[in-house]
């Protein structure tokens, strides 16, 4: 069997290489007139530079030197487009969004991990899911969730107080921010507590999720071949192939996923039946409990964690009131649950950590925010209602500016489903000096939406676009920002994207971000600890240097406000 697996792997590799060579021969001169950096390798192009965790300068070169569109040479000479031009982004994300859709690598990866959810569906199926989920992420529902949010943030404050009492000079705040984020998606999303803020035990689930994305980033090159790999053999056979790969990163990733499943069983062992199938069984058990609560009426629902206001309870209640044709299949509910946990955990964790990290370096701005929050909480007699919290001007400015300057995801990838024309707001010059006002984009072309490039575009935000300057939001934005509209759903920026594939949970994330930040800043003073470096990847992640490499954490000095 091992010999067969080895020969099969070789055959698969040859097939993939031939497939890429054919694509290269078809497309090698297709976009050569679009300016871009010279290729670093004849077969990998600029792949390593583009996806390098330390590739900040290369990306800055792309969005600073070449205008609104740049060519990026990738594997086997394939030409990709890197886009920051506002009009082009409008066509990609809104007007022609069904031409520019996620590629097979993205869809296959997410379907394998989560199931058929918003992150792995296209076309009519995606539109149906989006229409069904929109009400549970509405502004009205976010107002109802705020009473669920505050107790988690208060418990987080209690945990940090206990950490301070240990007398450490500094400690990793990301550890506890990550655990709190898990509780937010648990209680606010599923009506279920992971007990993630229990200091008496290590939360392996949270630790596994923290390392999951960095490990996936290390395997980004091999993920290019995933669409072909999933067509090869059975799931168990593919697992054996992975176990045979002599890679420490692959072994670590398998270990992390196994740990996540094992821990899920442990934290839910008090459920009605023994769990034998890991995370899948866990989510089914949560669904069974929800269905039972819904049968017993609103009073039983309210007694659950989250008081029945969580997203899953509301969604299931609406689904149970529908006719048979519109009811949500259980497998789809499970997929949405998994997606929400993953998407809601990492992005908000990173956003809160980034705010605390940058405020530790800006004590005057931190003090100004503390004064605003303290005064507001005193005026309203404690926890603020949704509208009062969201409208705090300096808190809002700090959140907006941090999300503009430091979006958790730097870019997203789209693949054209048919030939199309991409118009430009600002013309560029071709490699032979001609003015280019629109680009013919062939079917199957990879197009990158540069979130960071659009958010730092000096033609939109002004010459100080590279500065973290929350005060810019306390006055009217420059006319360039109001006259040129980026197609983002949030505050004229691309952080949460736009159009039909914009982040559906951005209001949930914003509310969580402001609740946690406001309570932490009111109670604690944050000062710099060991130097933190932010590495690029599918999501940005913070690291500190250690003897044998680096470690994912955000160590800060934390003291109580006197």
Image: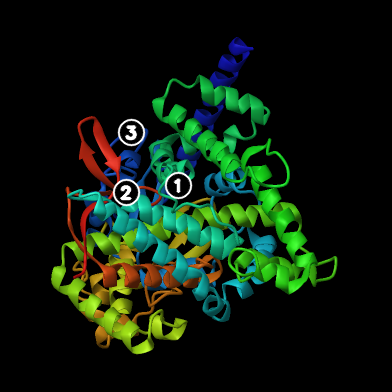
Q: Residues within 10 Å of mark 3 (few under 14, many from 20)?
A: few
Q: Which residue is found at the position 27% from the left and 69% from the top?
A: 523
Which callout, 3 or 1, points at the residue further toward the start of the chain?
Answer: 3
Q: Residues within 10 Å of mark 1 (few under 14, many from 20)?
A: many
Q: Position of residue 460 (x, y in %)?
A: 28, 76
Q: Which residue is found at the position 34% from the left and 71% from the top?
A: 519
Seen from the viewer's position, the closer of residues 383 and 462 is: 383
Q: Which element carries disc 3, helix, strand or loop? A: loop
Location of residue 41 (image quadrant) = top left
Q: Quadrant of the C terminus?
A: bottom left
CA gap between label 1 and label 2 equals 21 Å
Q: Which residue does the numbered mark 2 point to in the structure image?
A: 536
- Left or right: where does residue 436 sit relative to residue 164? right
Seen from the viewer's position, the closer of residues 165 and 214 is: 165
Q: Which residue does the numbered mark 1 point to in the structure image?
A: 206
- Left or right: where does residue 53 sit relative to residue 362? right
Q: Quadrant of the N terminus?
A: top right
Q: Position of residue 147 (x, y in %)?
A: 51, 74
Location of residue 5 (image quadrant) = top right
Q: Is residue 43 above or below residue 195?
A: above
Q: Is residue 547 above or below residue 329?
A: above
Q: Which residue does the numbered mark 3 point to in the structure image?
A: 42
């Amino acid at each position: 069997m091992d010999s067969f697996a080895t020969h099969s792997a070789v055959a698969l590799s040859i097939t993939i290489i031939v497939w890429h060579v054919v694509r290269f021969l078809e497309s090698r001169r297709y976009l050569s007139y679009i300016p871009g950096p010279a290729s670093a390798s004849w077969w990998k192009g600029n792949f390593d530079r583009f996806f390098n965790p330390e590739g900040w300068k290369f990306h800055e070169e792309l969005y600073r030197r070449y205008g609104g569109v740049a060519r990026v040479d990738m594997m086997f000479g394939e030409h990709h487009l890197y886009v920051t031009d506002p009009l082009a982004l409008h066509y990609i994300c809104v007007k022609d969004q069904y031409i520019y859709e996620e590629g097979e690598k993205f869809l296959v990866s997410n379907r394998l991990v989560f199931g058929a959810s918003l992150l792995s569906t296209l076309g009519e199926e995606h539109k149906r899911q989006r229409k069904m989920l929109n009400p549970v992420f509405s502004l009205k529902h976010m107002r109802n969730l705020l009473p669920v949010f505050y107790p988690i943030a208060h418990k987080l404050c209690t945990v940090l107080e206990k950490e301070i009492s240990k007398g450490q000079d500094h400690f990793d705040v990301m550890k506890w921010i990550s655990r709190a984020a898990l509780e937010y998606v648990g209680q606010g999303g599923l009506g279920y507590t992971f007990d993630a803020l229990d200091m008496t035990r290590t939360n392996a689930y949270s630790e596994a999720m923290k390392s999951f994305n960095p490990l996936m980033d290390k395997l980004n090159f091999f993920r290019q071949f995933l669409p072909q790999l999933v067509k090869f053999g059975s799931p168990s056979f593919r697992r054996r192939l992975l176990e045979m790969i002599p890679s420490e990163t692959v072994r670590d990733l398998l270990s992390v996923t196994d740990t996540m499943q094992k821990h899920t069983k442990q934290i839910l062992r008090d459920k009605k039946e023994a769990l034998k199938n890991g995370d899948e069984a866990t989510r089914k058990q949560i669904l069974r409990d929800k269905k039972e609560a819904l049968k017993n009426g609103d009073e039983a629902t309210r007694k659950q964690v989250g008081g029945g206001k969580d997203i899953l309870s509301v969604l299931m209640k609406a689904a149970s009131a529908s006719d048979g044709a519109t009811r949500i299949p259980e497998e789809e509910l499970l997929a949405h649950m998994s997606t929400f946990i993953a998407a809601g955990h990492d992005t908000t964790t990173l956003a809160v950590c980034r705010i605390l990290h940058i405020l530790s370096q800006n004590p005057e701005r931190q003090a100004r925010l503390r004064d605003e929050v303290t005064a507001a909480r005193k005026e309203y007699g404690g926890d603020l209602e949704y509208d009062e919290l969201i409208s705090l001007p300096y808190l809002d400015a700090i959140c907006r500016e941090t999300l503009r300057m430091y979006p958790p995801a730097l870019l997203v990838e789209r693949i054209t489903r048919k030939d199309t024309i991409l118009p430009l707001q600002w013309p560029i010059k071709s490699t032979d000096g001609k003015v280019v006002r629109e680009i013919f984009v062939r079917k199957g072309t990879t197009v990158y939406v540069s979130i960071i490039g659009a958010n730092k575009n000096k033609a939109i935000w002004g010459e100080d676009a590279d500065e973290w300057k929350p005060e810019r939001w306390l006055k009217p934005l420059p006319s360039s920002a109001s006259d040129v509209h980026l197609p983002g759903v949030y505050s004229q920026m691309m952080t949460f994207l736009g159009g039909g594939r914009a982040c559906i949970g951005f209001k949930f994330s914003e509310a969580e971000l402001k609740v946690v930040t406001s309570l932490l800043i009111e109670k604690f003073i944050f000062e710099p600890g060991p130097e933190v470096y932010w590495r690029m990847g599918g999501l940005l992640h913070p690291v500190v240097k250690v003897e044998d490499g680096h470690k994912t954490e955000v160590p800060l000095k934390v003291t109580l406000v006197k």
